Image (cartoon, grey):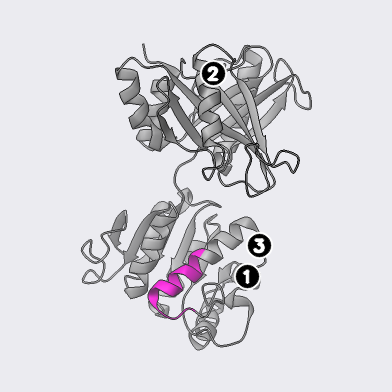
Amino acid sequence: MDEIFDDIERWRQLGQRVAIARVVDIEGSGPRDPGAAMAVNSGGEVAGSVSGGCVEGAVVGEALELLEGRRSAGITSFGYSDDEAFAVGLTCGGTIHLFIEELDW
Amino acid sequence: MTSIYERFRDLIRSETPVVLATLIEGPNIGAKLLVEESGARMGSLGSEQLDRVIGRDAIAMLDAGTSEVRHYGPDGEARQHGLSVFIESHARRPHMVIFGAVDFTRALAGQGKLLGFRVTVCDAREVFATRRRFPMADEVVVDWPDRLLERIGDDLGPRDAVCVLTHDTKFDVPAIVGALSTRVGYLGAMGSRQTHEKRIARLVEEGVTVEELDRVRSPIGLDIGGRTPEETAVSIVAEIIAMRTGRDAPSLSEGQGSIH
């Protein structure tokens, strides 16, 4: 998480709200280990990453929904699926489970 | 008052080991418990019993350097599935101790840093063991290997590495004997197959047992045909990774063929 603290500090000083998504579990192959984190502010700016760039776009969407009160904190999973050729997933074929919450603790 | 986040951030920034436990399934989603190496706790996941159990598990995971989701009953009972807790440990960086301030050392110290090790270079010869020659190392120590290991040996564990690059039995033997008395996970020694044979003989004279010799990767590194200091460094760190992950990569110490 180390690398995202500077951005988080800056955002908080500007009075922006911040959501954090952390990798908590991986099935099969995944590019980042549990603990990898990304932060998203209410303006949609991003720090850090939770995959090799495969799911970050979708995570920003989830984070903004959380900050706008349209979803609650919890686990969101991304995996590869043949049926959903255009759905968000990992090209490496694994599944990652993220915990998304607001940084209000 | 300091928040859990602020405390967590400050500990990570000062490279102090810490564990952050987050309740991710169950009542109280998002509840936090911060656990420090001393066992000190901040926050709560819901009940004192639960916090005590997680505090204990967190310390064990910090020692192993792992992060994962664990499942508990409402008061921390094992083998129940009411609660899921993500336990994220931030362990101290693993330590790589390199004996011998030679050309290979510079390349290995650089590779060690790339992989996130705290790197110490040690050599008894002060003209070689200088900061100027090893600016990438976290510390450069002028001392005999056995004396350094006497000081830091108790802190070495399964995630750490000792690499002996001196290929001079005067330095190698005390370094290897000293490292064998620690819990260090990886212990490797550089040298040709001929140097290796002589070194084994000297180690046996010093009373090192056959089982202990099994712990020593000598000649050091994976069998990738590396020749330059940089290539050799890659073969050494690759061997360290393969040992940690338990993969069956071909080590030079298990073959008989030429090194280069």
| Nearer to the camera, B188 or B31 | B31
Q: Are marks 3 and 2 on the same chain?
A: no
Let me know if residue A35 is in the magenta part. Answer: no
Under mark 2, the amino acid is: Glu
When the figure is inspected, residue B6 is found, relative to residue A83, above or below; the finding is above
When the figure is inspected, residue B66 is found, relative to residue B161, above or below; the finding is above
Q: Are marks 1 and 2 on the same chain?
A: no
Q: Quadrant of the N terminus of chain A?
A: top left
Q: CA distance from mark 3 to mark 2?
A: 42 Å
Crowding around mark 3 (Cα neighbors within 10 Å: few <14, some 14 to 19, many 20+) is few
Give the quarter of the image for residue B145.
bottom left
Mark 3 residue element: loop
**Residue B214 tag number:** 1
Identity of the residue drawn at 53% across and 86% down: B193
| Nearer to the camera, B149 or B230 | B230
Q: Main secondary structure of the magenta part?
A: helix
Q: Which residue is mark 3?
A: B247
Give the quarter of the image for residue B80.
top right
Which of label 1 and label 2 is nearer to you? 2
Question: Chain ID for label 3?
Answer: B
Which of label 3 and label 1 is nearer to you? 3
Q: Which residues are magenta?
A: B226-237
Under mark 3, the amino acid is: Arg
Identity of the residue drawn at 59% across and 66% down: B215
Identity of the residue drawn at 56% across and 71% down: B217
Which of label 3 and label 2 is nearer to you? 2
Q: Which residue is mark 2?
A: A65
Q: CA distance from mark 3 to mark 1?
A: 17 Å
